[in-house]
Image: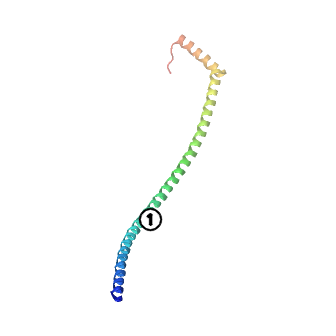
Amino acid sequence: MNPTDITIDILKSIRDEIRVVGQRQAETNERLDRHEEILVQLVRGQERHERILERHEKILEHHGQILEHHSQILERHEKALGLLIGEVRNLGGRIDNIVSGQLGEKVRDLDLRVTALESRLGPVTP
């Protein structure tokens, strides 16, 4: 075999290997392109989820403010109810004093007298 034939065979072999490497590189580039598309879709999806999360955070913050406002209203109502209960108890005490005190005695006495008069005179219609 002559040196030129060996050189040609080596060059052909190198050329064939370069073609194989080129084909592999093309396949790798296709896979990289597909992976890049997937990553772009994932990033878009993540951005969409972040926007959704931001909206939900705002909604939750608003609901927290509403709950705080309702809590303050409830406290005011509880205080007002406590005051009202105290006033009703005071009123009950006053009524008890009227019924069992001097005025109550006068009312009972007047009722007895009216009943006695009606029994003697008959019922009086207004």
Residue under the point 42% across and 66% down: 39
| Residue 10 picture location, percent across and down | 36, 83
Relative to 72, does residue 35 appear above or below in the rendering? below
Label 1 crowd bin: few (<14), some (14–19), many (20+), radius 10 Å: few
Relative to 116, does residue 27 appear above or below in the rendering? below
Q: Secondary structure at mark 1?
A: helix
| Residue 60 picture location, percent across and down | 50, 53
Residue under the point 62% across and 26% down: 95
Q: Residue furthest front?
A: 1
Relative to 92, does residue 108 appear above or below in the rendering? above
- Pick whichever, 126 or 75, lies toward us: 75
Relative to 100, does residue 81 appear above or below in the rendering? below
| Residue 52 picture location, percent across and down | 45, 58
Q: Considering the image in quadrants, where does the N terminus appear?
A: bottom left
Residue highlighted by disc 1: 43
Residue under the point 53% across and 50% down: 64
Query: How many tags in the picture?
Result: 1
Q: Residue furthest top?
A: 120
- Pick whichever, 16 or 83, lies toward us: 16
| Residue 107 picture location, percent across and down | 61, 20
Residue under the point 49% across and 19% down: 125
The quadrant in which residue 8 appears is bottom left
